[in-house]
Image: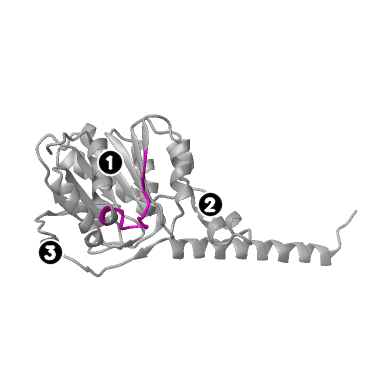
Protein backbone atom coordinates (compact mmCIF):
# COMPACT_ATOMS: atom_id res chain seq x y z
CA UNK A 1 0.00 0.00 0.00
CA UNK A 2 1.42 3.37 -0.98
CA UNK A 3 1.48 6.10 1.64
CA UNK A 4 0.02 9.37 0.31
CA UNK A 5 2.59 12.07 -0.33
CA UNK A 6 0.66 14.46 1.92
CA UNK A 7 0.94 12.04 4.84
CA UNK A 8 4.69 11.64 4.27
CA UNK A 9 5.12 15.42 4.26
CA UNK A 10 3.15 15.71 7.50
CA UNK A 11 5.34 13.09 9.16
CA UNK A 12 8.49 14.85 7.95
CA UNK A 13 7.29 18.17 9.29
CA UNK A 14 6.42 16.55 12.64
CA UNK A 15 9.91 15.05 12.92
CA UNK A 16 11.50 18.39 12.04
CA UNK A 17 9.44 20.18 14.67
CA UNK A 18 10.32 17.54 17.25
CA UNK A 19 14.02 17.90 16.41
CA UNK A 20 13.74 21.67 16.67
CA UNK A 21 12.04 21.48 20.06
CA UNK A 22 14.70 19.03 21.27
CA UNK A 23 17.51 21.28 20.01
CA UNK A 24 15.96 24.35 21.63
CA UNK A 25 15.55 22.43 24.87
CA UNK A 26 19.22 21.46 24.91
CA UNK A 27 20.25 25.02 23.99
CA UNK A 28 18.16 26.40 26.85
CA UNK A 29 19.64 23.84 29.22
CA UNK A 30 23.20 24.71 28.20
CA UNK A 31 22.49 28.45 28.46
CA UNK A 32 20.77 28.16 31.84
CA UNK A 33 23.23 25.82 33.59
CA UNK A 34 26.42 27.88 33.44
CA UNK A 35 26.62 31.55 34.39
CA UNK A 36 30.32 32.43 34.21
CA UNK A 37 31.62 35.66 35.67
CA UNK A 38 34.91 37.46 35.12
CA UNK A 39 34.51 40.01 37.91
CA UNK A 40 36.11 39.59 41.33
CA UNK A 41 34.00 40.86 44.22
CA UNK A 42 36.64 40.13 46.85
CA UNK A 43 40.35 39.51 47.23
CA UNK A 44 42.13 36.97 49.44
CA UNK A 45 43.75 39.82 51.37
CA UNK A 46 40.33 40.97 52.56
CA UNK A 47 40.04 37.65 54.40
CA UNK A 48 43.59 37.66 55.66
CA UNK A 49 44.56 34.95 53.20
CA UNK A 50 47.76 34.71 51.16
CA UNK A 51 47.35 31.93 48.60
CA UNK A 52 49.77 30.85 45.93
CA UNK A 53 48.60 31.92 42.48
CA UNK A 54 48.40 28.86 40.23
CA UNK A 55 48.21 28.39 36.46
CA UNK A 56 47.71 25.04 34.73
CA UNK A 57 46.46 23.72 31.41
CA UNK A 58 43.13 22.04 30.69
CA UNK A 59 41.99 21.12 27.19
CA UNK A 60 44.25 23.72 25.63
CA UNK A 61 43.07 26.51 27.95
CA UNK A 62 45.07 28.12 30.73
CA UNK A 63 43.22 27.89 34.03
CA UNK A 64 43.68 29.96 37.17
CA UNK A 65 43.55 28.73 40.73
CA UNK A 66 44.59 29.49 44.30
CA UNK A 67 46.45 27.09 46.55
CA UNK A 68 46.17 27.61 50.30
CA UNK A 69 48.69 25.61 52.29
CA UNK A 70 47.43 23.74 55.33
CA UNK A 71 49.20 22.18 58.28
CA UNK A 72 51.62 19.42 57.25
CA UNK A 73 49.92 16.04 57.18
CA UNK A 74 46.39 17.43 57.05
CA UNK A 75 44.01 16.71 54.16
CA UNK A 76 43.69 19.04 51.18
CA UNK A 77 40.30 20.09 49.84
CA UNK A 78 39.94 20.20 46.07
CA UNK A 79 37.14 22.76 45.82
CA UNK A 80 34.91 22.54 42.73
CA UNK A 81 32.70 25.61 42.52
CA UNK A 82 29.11 25.91 41.37
CA UNK A 83 27.74 27.38 38.17
CA UNK A 84 28.29 31.09 38.87
CA UNK A 85 30.82 33.52 40.26
CA UNK A 86 34.56 33.05 40.65
CA UNK A 87 36.96 31.60 43.18
CA UNK A 88 36.71 34.91 45.03
CA UNK A 89 33.07 34.24 45.88
CA UNK A 90 34.16 31.18 47.88
CA UNK A 91 36.81 32.92 49.99
CA UNK A 92 34.53 33.25 53.01
CA UNK A 93 34.08 29.50 53.28
CA UNK A 94 37.72 28.83 52.40
CA UNK A 95 38.88 31.08 55.23
CA UNK A 96 37.27 28.65 57.67
CA UNK A 97 38.91 25.60 56.09
CA UNK A 98 42.33 27.23 56.24
CA UNK A 99 41.82 28.30 59.85
CA UNK A 100 41.11 24.64 60.64
CA UNK A 101 44.49 23.69 59.22
CA UNK A 102 43.21 22.18 55.99
CA UNK A 103 44.91 22.81 52.68
CA UNK A 104 42.66 24.08 49.88
CA UNK A 105 43.02 24.18 46.13
CA UNK A 106 40.29 26.03 44.25
CA UNK A 107 40.39 26.54 40.51
CA UNK A 108 38.23 28.49 38.09
CA UNK A 109 36.74 26.42 35.26
CA UNK A 110 37.09 27.58 31.68
CA UNK A 111 35.33 30.89 31.11
CA UNK A 112 35.26 31.78 34.82
CA UNK A 113 37.37 34.46 36.52
CA UNK A 114 40.76 34.81 34.87
CA UNK A 115 40.75 31.32 33.35
CA UNK A 116 40.88 31.09 29.58
CA UNK A 117 38.54 29.25 27.27
CA UNK A 118 34.76 29.15 27.06
CA UNK A 119 32.37 27.85 29.69
CA UNK A 120 30.56 24.78 28.36
CA UNK A 121 29.18 21.77 30.20
CA UNK A 122 31.75 19.33 28.81
CA UNK A 123 34.72 21.44 29.88
CA UNK A 124 33.17 22.05 33.30
CA UNK A 125 33.61 18.35 34.01
CA UNK A 126 36.91 17.91 32.18
CA UNK A 127 38.57 20.77 34.06
CA UNK A 128 38.16 18.94 37.37
CA UNK A 129 40.32 16.08 36.07
CA UNK A 130 43.14 18.44 35.11
CA UNK A 131 42.83 20.24 38.45
CA UNK A 132 43.19 16.94 40.29
CA UNK A 133 46.19 16.01 38.12
CA UNK A 134 47.82 19.34 38.90
CA UNK A 135 47.26 18.87 42.63
CA UNK A 136 48.52 15.29 42.76
CA UNK A 137 51.04 15.01 39.93
CA UNK A 138 52.47 18.52 39.76
CA UNK A 139 52.28 19.59 43.41
CA UNK A 140 52.87 16.09 44.73
CA UNK A 141 49.93 16.07 47.15
CA UNK A 142 49.19 12.56 48.39
CA UNK A 143 46.02 11.46 46.57
CA UNK A 144 44.86 9.63 49.72
CA UNK A 145 44.69 13.00 51.52
CA UNK A 146 42.54 14.76 48.89
CA UNK A 147 38.94 15.55 49.81
CA UNK A 148 36.88 16.50 46.76
CA UNK A 149 34.27 19.13 47.60
CA UNK A 150 31.56 19.85 45.03
CA UNK A 151 29.40 22.89 45.73
CA UNK A 152 26.02 22.98 43.95
CA UNK A 153 26.66 22.16 40.25
CA UNK A 154 30.22 21.32 41.28
CA UNK A 155 28.78 18.12 42.70
CA UNK A 156 28.59 16.70 39.17
CA UNK A 157 32.35 16.75 38.42
CA UNK A 158 33.09 15.96 42.09
CA UNK A 159 31.26 12.64 41.96
CA UNK A 160 32.54 11.71 38.51
CA UNK A 161 36.08 12.48 39.64
CA UNK A 162 35.77 10.55 42.90
CA UNK A 163 34.62 7.50 40.95
CA UNK A 164 37.68 7.58 38.69
CA UNK A 165 40.61 8.61 40.92
CA UNK A 166 42.01 7.92 44.36
CA UNK A 167 40.86 10.29 47.11
CA UNK A 168 40.09 10.43 50.82
CA UNK A 169 36.41 11.28 50.43
CA UNK A 170 33.75 13.50 48.88
CA UNK A 171 31.73 16.41 50.24
CA UNK A 172 28.56 17.46 48.43
CA UNK A 173 27.21 20.86 49.41
CA UNK A 174 23.78 21.85 48.12
CA UNK A 175 23.96 19.36 45.23
CA UNK A 176 21.08 18.15 43.06
CA UNK A 177 19.82 14.71 42.08
CA UNK A 178 19.99 15.35 38.33
CA UNK A 179 19.35 18.02 35.72
CA UNK A 180 16.16 16.20 34.78
CA UNK A 181 14.90 16.35 38.34
CA UNK A 182 15.72 20.05 38.49
CA UNK A 183 13.68 20.54 35.32
CA UNK A 184 10.76 18.80 37.02
CA UNK A 185 11.14 21.13 39.99
CA UNK A 186 11.16 24.27 37.87
CA UNK A 187 8.45 23.14 35.43
CA UNK A 188 6.15 20.86 37.47
CA UNK A 189 3.23 21.22 35.08
CA UNK A 190 5.09 20.68 31.82
CA UNK A 191 7.13 17.67 30.63
CA UNK A 192 10.22 19.81 30.00
CA UNK A 193 12.37 17.23 31.76
CA UNK A 194 12.16 14.87 28.76
CA UNK A 195 14.27 17.39 26.83
CA UNK A 196 16.96 17.52 29.50
CA UNK A 197 20.16 15.55 29.03
CA UNK A 198 20.93 12.59 31.23
CA UNK A 199 24.66 13.16 31.69
CA UNK A 200 24.40 15.47 34.74
CA UNK A 201 23.04 12.68 36.94
CA UNK A 202 24.35 12.66 40.50
CA UNK A 203 21.95 9.91 41.57
CA UNK A 204 23.64 7.53 39.16
CA UNK A 205 27.15 8.48 40.25
CA UNK A 206 26.60 8.58 44.01
CA UNK A 207 25.61 4.89 44.01
CA UNK A 208 29.08 3.98 42.70
CA UNK A 209 31.08 5.67 45.46
CA UNK A 210 33.72 3.63 47.23
CA UNK A 211 34.93 6.45 49.50
CA UNK A 212 33.30 8.21 52.49
CA UNK A 213 30.66 10.83 51.68
CA UNK A 214 29.49 13.92 53.57
CA UNK A 215 26.29 15.55 52.28
CA UNK A 216 25.61 19.09 53.52
CA UNK A 217 22.48 21.08 52.80
CA UNK A 218 20.67 24.19 53.97
CA UNK A 219 17.19 23.66 55.33
CA UNK A 220 16.02 26.92 53.73
CA UNK A 221 17.71 26.40 50.36
CA UNK A 222 15.32 27.89 47.79
CA UNK A 223 17.50 27.14 44.75
CA UNK A 224 18.05 23.39 45.16
CA UNK A 225 15.47 21.90 47.51
CA UNK A 226 16.81 19.97 50.53
CA UNK A 227 15.11 16.78 49.31
CA UNK A 228 17.81 16.51 46.62
CA UNK A 229 20.53 16.14 49.26
CA UNK A 230 18.42 13.74 51.30
CA UNK A 231 17.86 11.57 48.25
CA UNK A 232 21.56 11.52 47.33
CA UNK A 233 22.39 10.53 50.89
CA UNK A 234 19.83 7.72 50.80
CA UNK A 235 21.26 6.37 47.54
CA UNK A 236 24.91 6.47 48.62
CA UNK A 237 26.66 3.43 50.11
CA UNK A 238 28.24 3.56 53.55
CA UNK A 239 30.22 5.22 55.03
CA UNK A 240 28.21 8.42 54.75
CA UNK A 241 26.95 11.33 56.80
CA UNK A 242 24.15 13.86 56.33
CA UNK A 243 24.60 17.34 57.79
CA UNK A 244 21.63 19.71 57.85
CA UNK A 245 22.14 23.42 58.51
CA UNK A 246 18.49 24.09 59.15
CA UNK A 247 18.55 27.89 58.78
CA UNK A 248 21.03 27.84 55.91
CA UNK A 249 20.30 28.72 52.32
CA UNK A 250 22.18 27.66 49.20
CA UNK A 251 25.55 29.30 49.81
CA UNK A 252 25.56 30.68 53.36
CA UNK A 253 25.69 27.55 55.51
CA UNK A 254 29.22 28.30 56.71
CA UNK A 255 28.03 31.70 57.97
CA UNK A 256 24.66 30.70 59.42
CA UNK A 257 26.03 27.99 61.71
CA UNK A 258 29.83 27.88 61.47
CA UNK A 259 30.21 25.60 64.49
CA UNK A 260 27.97 22.94 62.96
CA UNK A 261 29.26 23.39 59.41
CA UNK A 262 32.99 23.44 60.11
CA UNK A 263 32.61 20.92 62.92
CA UNK A 264 31.13 18.44 60.45
CA UNK A 265 33.93 19.01 57.97
CA UNK A 266 36.61 18.72 60.65
CA UNK A 267 35.11 15.41 61.79
CA UNK A 268 34.91 14.15 58.21
CA UNK A 269 38.52 15.18 57.54
CA UNK A 270 39.67 13.40 60.68
CA UNK A 271 41.07 16.49 62.36
CA UNK A 272 41.81 16.41 66.06
CA UNK A 273 39.82 18.72 68.32
CA UNK A 274 42.90 20.86 69.00
CA UNK A 275 43.23 21.61 65.31
**Rendered view: 65 above or below 72:** below
Front position in the image: 137 or 266: 266
| Residue 264: image tag | 1
Residue beneath disc 2 = 181
Please provide the residue range marked out in magenta. Answer: 242-255
Spatial CA distance of label 2 from label 3 is: 38 Å
**Residue 157 coordinates in the image, percent (x, y):** 36, 47
Can residue 187 be spotted in the picture?
Answer: yes
- To which quarter of the image does residue 269 belong? top left
Q: Secondary structure at mark 3?
A: helix
Q: Residue 222 vs residue 112: left or right?
A: right
Q: Depth-wise, is mark 1 or mark 2 nearer the camera?
A: 1
From the image, state whether disc 2 or disc 3 is nearer to you: 3
The residue where tag 3 is placed is 46
Magenta stretch contains residue 65: no
Q: Colour mode?
A: one colour
Which quarter of the figure is the C terminus placed in?
A: top left
Amino acid sequence: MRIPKLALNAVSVAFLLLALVFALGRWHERDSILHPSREYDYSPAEFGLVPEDVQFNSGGARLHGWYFAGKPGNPVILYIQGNAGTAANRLGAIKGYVDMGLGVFIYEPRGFGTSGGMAVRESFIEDSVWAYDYLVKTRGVDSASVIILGQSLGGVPALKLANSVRCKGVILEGAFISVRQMAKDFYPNAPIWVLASSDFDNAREVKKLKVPLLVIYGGRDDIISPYHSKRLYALAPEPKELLAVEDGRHTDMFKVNPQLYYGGIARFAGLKASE
